Image: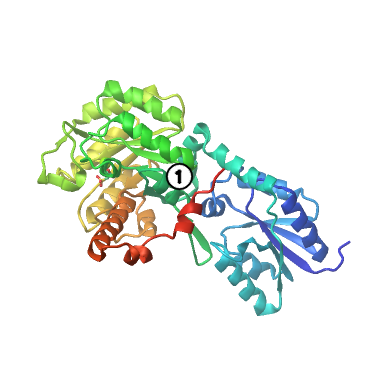
Amino acid sequence: MYPSMKSVYICFGTDVIHGGHIRILERAAQLGRVTAGVLTDTAVASYRRYPLLPYEERKSIIENLKGVSEVVPQDSLSYAENVRRLRPDYVVHGDDWLEGAQKPIREEVIALLGEYGGELVEYPYSDDESHKLLDSSVRETLSLPDVRRSRLKKLLAIKKPVSVLEAHNGITGLIVEKTCVVENGQARQFDAMWVSSLCDSTAKGKPDIELVDMTSRLQTIDEIMEVTTKPIILDGDTGGKTEHFVYNVRTLERMGVSAIIIEDKVGLKKNSLFGTEVKQTQDSIENFSAKIAAGKKALRTKDFMIIARIESLILEQGMEDALRRAFAFVAAGADGIMIHSRKKAPDEIFEFCAKFREKDGTTPLIVVPTSFNAVTEEEFAKRGVNIVIYANHLIRSSFKAMQKTAEMILEAHRCKEVDDNCISIKEILTLIPQQ
Ligand code: SPV
Ligand code: MG
């Protein structure tokens, strides 16, 4: 039946099969009996984009392709586990992984095959325009409001913690969307974006006191949404007046935002990282619970999340107060609890998580480790945290780089010296492809 009884391994991460895949598969089948790996949902999400089709569906598509004898899951971008187990005579791949994020994966495959005399066979990757169009139409689908909005809850179901980085305009949105590193055969990407009040205000040269109004915040979100597909979590400050909040959550839901986080403060809001150095007033449990409940009632979908942020530790009101509020806000309908702290040591955050998890094993917990920044995502996950938000790091790092460049031009009376600090003209011209 087979030209030889050699074994072949090929892996599919795609949810759209096109002629390019079929041609590679035909060639693979000429080499021997084909086992196809199918990337699991977590593996796809960590590498390219959230899959349009779940694993089971993608598996059954691949199973039904001519030339595929068997399908096995591949849990990570790395082929190592399956290659070690199956010891195929050939691994087949397109030649599109010679550079970029997949390069180390390719090198690992070559090394593994070398251990027992297996061979990597590469075929030219299809650069057919129609196939590229397919990928961009998948991206367009992922950016549609209904699809984008629902993805945060889907991510929460498959990934712990969900890793989130701030974006405050189109270009920072693209950085969160596209940055990918590969480490020990695992691809790592950010899962979602945080539209921070601090960064949105700072980018406009304004203080973080709810001065940048909702209309402007919505424009920032729209700018990010136009060029990205990942879910968005909005920093909703205090949520404002309940009468306004109910309108705003509906607008955000309609736009395709996945979640809003509102903090239990009233009056003139100042940034939490000031702590008790400035006057800040916490809302009562009753008022804030009523605001959450009203927001929940206004929603039209089950996807949009209203997350309550507790400021008790920031305002030095103690652990008991923080926990009392957390349980009350969950009872009022909150879809998640963000606990904030400005202490360098994570002890109070860990204590809160442990005590909260004693009574509530399911409500998502969110942290913003700007101060307690030595804790890894793995450690947070062990402590029961579901979402980690890096809330201000793109604006803080870009500010430092921009200021340095400005100083260097002034000092040198010309701009030659700053060239090494800058992305090249060629790169900036081609960074954003024209559609
Ligand atoms: C923000 O990013 O605006 C936040 C988080 O609210 S923090 O600055 O830590 O208060
Ligand atoms: Mg804020």
Q: Amino acid at mark 1?
A: Leu
Q: Is residue 340 visible to us here?
A: yes
Nearest the eye: 131 or 318? 131
Compared across the picture, whether 370 is left or right of 224 comes to left
Compared across the picture, whether 251 is left or right of 104 comes to left
Q: Quadrant of residue 330?
A: top left
Dividing the image into four quarters, tell me where ligand 1 lies. Answer: top left
Task: Give the residue drawn at x 40%, y 30%.
Answer: 252
Q: Is mark 1 within 8 Å of ligand 1?
A: no
Question: Relative to 345, is 116 above or below?
Answer: below
Residue 41 image point, x, y percent? 57, 49
Nearest the eye: 52 or 209? 209
Tell me the residue that label 1 is attached to.
156
Residue 370 image point, x, y percent? 27, 53
Q: How is the image coloured?
A: rainbow
Total numbered labels placed on residues in the image: 1
Task: Give the residue drawn at x 16%, y 45%.
Answer: 318
Q: Secondary structure at mark 1?
A: helix
Residue 275 image point, x, y percent? 15, 46
Q: Quadrant of residue 73?
A: bottom right
Q: Quadrant of the N terminus?
A: bottom right
Q: Quadrant of the C terminus?
A: top right
Task: Give the residue drawn at x 49%, y 32%.
Answer: 145
Nearest the eye: 110 or 411? 411
Compared across the picture, whether 367 is left or right of 66 comes to left
